[in-house]
C-alpha cells in the first residue's frame, strides 16, 4: 500500500499506511486517490489527508493495486 511519510519532532519519518479494513486504530475512511476505493487511516493519517485536500494538493493515498500500477508506470518511465 501507499505510505505517507511525515516527520515527528525527533526528525524520524513516521509511516502512515492505509488499510482496506477498518480497525480499532484506523477508524477514518479516505478514498484511494486513483480509483476511489475505501481505505482506512488513523487520526494522524486523516489529519494529513485533510490538510492535503484543504491545501489543494492531490489525495496522498493509493490502494495496493493502484500503488503497484503507479510503481510499474514510474519504472517504465
Image (spheres, rainbow, N blue to C red):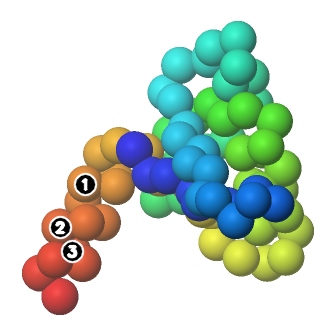
Q: Between residues 58 and 1, which one lies in front from this camera angle?
A: 1
- The residue carrying mark 1 is 68
Instruction: Please provide percent x and percent y for residue 52.
Output: 77, 67
Query: Toward which corner of the image does residue 33 lie, by quadrant?
Result: bottom right
- The residue carrying mark 2 is 72
Residues at marks 1 and 2 touching, judged by CB atoms closer than 8 Å: yes
Q: Secondary structure at mark 1?
A: helix
Q: Secondary structure at mark 3?
A: helix
Instruction: Judge whether residue 26 can be spotted in this image.
Output: yes
Residue displayed at 62% across by 51% down = 14
Instruction: Please provide percent x and percent y for residue 17.
Output: 53, 41
CA gap, disc 3 and disc 1? 9 Å
Instruction: Judge whether residue 35 can be spotted in this image.
Output: no
Residue displayed at 63% across by 14% down = 23
Residue displayed at 82% across by 60% down = 9
Q: Secondary structure at mark 2?
A: helix
Residues at marks 2 and 3 touching, judged by CB atoms closer than 8 Å: yes
The circle drawn on residue 73 is: 3
Query: Toward which corner of the image does residue 60 lie, by quadrant?
Result: bottom right
* The N terminus: image quadrant: top left
Instruction: Please provide percent x and percent y for residue 57.
Output: 71, 76
Which is more N-terminal, label 1 or label 3?
Answer: 1
Amino acid at each position: 500500500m501507499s505510505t505517507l511519510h511525515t516527520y515527528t519532532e525527533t526528525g524520524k519519518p513516521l509511516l502512515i499506511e492505509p488499510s482496506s479494513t477498518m480497525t480499532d486504530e484506523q477508524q477514518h475512511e479516505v478514498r484511494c486517490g486513483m480509483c476511489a476505493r475505501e481505505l482506512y487511516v488513523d487520526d494522524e493519517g486523516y489529519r494529513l489527508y485533510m490538510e492535503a485536500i484543504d491545501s489543494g494538493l492531490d489525495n496522498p493515498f493509493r490502494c495496493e493495486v493502484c500503488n503497484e500500477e503507479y510503481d510499474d508506470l514510474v519504472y517504465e518511465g
